[in-house]
Image (cartoon, rainbow, N blue to C red):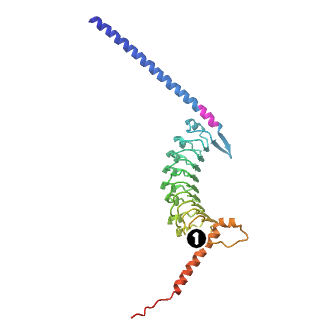
Amino acid sequence: MSGNAVCTGAVTAVKEVWEKRIKTINEDLKREKEFRQKLVKIWEERVSLTKLKEKVTRENGRVILKIEKEEWKTLPSSLLKLNQLQEWQLHRTGLLKIPEFIGRFQNLLVLDLSRNTISEIPRGIGLLTRLQELNLSYNKIKTVPKELSNCASLEKLELAVNREICDLPQELSSLLKLTHLDLSMNHFTTIPPAVLNLPALEWLDLGSNRLEQLPDTIERMQNLHTLWLQWNEITCLPETISNMKNLSTIVLCNNKLQDIPVCMEDMTNLRFVNFRDNPLKLEVTLPPSESIEEDEQELFGLQFMHTYIQESRRRADNQVNCSATLPIAINTDG
């Protein structure tokens, strides 16, 4: 029995030594694999950085990263070494997301990532306090973070053709310098209060959404001079629209308007309107003009609008006169 015990003990000891050696080898292999992976990553980052440096140009005194039609689904952290960049222009690169470290590019003035496949805007975007233009059109964004309101220098914001954006955070109304806003081809059913309260807004595109009506509070946008509302489902215009004294262009083609409010006749700053392809209840023929070609005259909606309002007023006056001259029936029975 003692011999068997010694033999068993020796086997156990050898097994333990072997298992320990195997474990050590496996750990060494694991460390070596991790080290190689780090080397590969470092190498890839260096290669990526070299490629990115080749895309950096200088235009009008600005340092610009410009990439077009070249696959960059993600941006490497080595990009941080180019923190002097003032403008990004990355189009049709297949970019899936804006890097979380975007907020560390404090010199950025323009961020143009249009025509990619970005699905969200990181909250770190709010750290870009010098950013003047942000273009994220033609992506797959569904929501806009309230942190965007911290981009105090923002003057131009383009979110067109994301298709799923249906609202904006109220905090965006604090963008005091924002003058240009493009929200076309999304899913808005009304003008967000944040937009109505933007104090400096001059140009707004809400075309190709699902707007059914305009709020009475639209008159708050006193600095607005251009308003695009084509391809919506708007059925009527509020009387308060006539209080928008700076409005010079309004496009309302392809809606469901049945009438043009008479008050629009008082909008003396209007230079261009378009009511084409609306089911307006009155048929109006423009008087011939020697100075305007027929096709141009049809597109010149301002003359059409005034002619329509005049016809509408004439018919209203006729109805009043007809009502006043109707004979009064006197009941003589009894």
Q: Secondary structure at mark 1?
A: helix
Q: Farthest residue to the front: give it.
A: 333
- Residue 197 in view: no
Q: Quadrant of the N terminus?
A: top left
Q: Please identify the quarter of the rendering in which residue 269 is found.
A: bottom right
Which residue lies at the image location 54% right of the left edge and 80% below the top edge? 319
In this rendering, the answer to whether 175 lies above or below 40 is below
User: 294 and 273: which one is in front?
Assistant: 294
Image point (45%, 18%), residue name: 25
Q: Main secondary structure of the magenta part?
A: helix
Q: Nearer the viewer, residue 194 or 140?
A: 140
68 relative position to 16: left or right:
right
232 or 111: nearer the viewer: 232
Q: Which residue is mark 1?
A: 264
Q: Which quarter of the figure has residue 85?
A: top right
Which amino acid does the dot numbered 1 rest on?
Met
Q: Nearer the viewer, residue 130 or 325?
A: 325
Residue 47 can be seen, yes or no: yes
The magenta span reads 46-53
Place of residue 237 in the rendered image (x, y in percent of width and height, measured from the top left):
53, 67
Q: Is residue 67 left or right of residue 150?
A: right
Tell me where residue 126 appears, x and y as whole percent.
52, 48
Residue 140 inside the magenta-drawn segment? no
Position of residue 299 measured from the top left corner of the image (x, y, whole percent): 65, 65
Indicate whether residue 50 is drawn in magenta: yes
Expressed as whole percent of the image width and height from the top left, the position of residue 20 reads 40, 17
- Residue occupying image coordinates x 68% and y 45%: 59
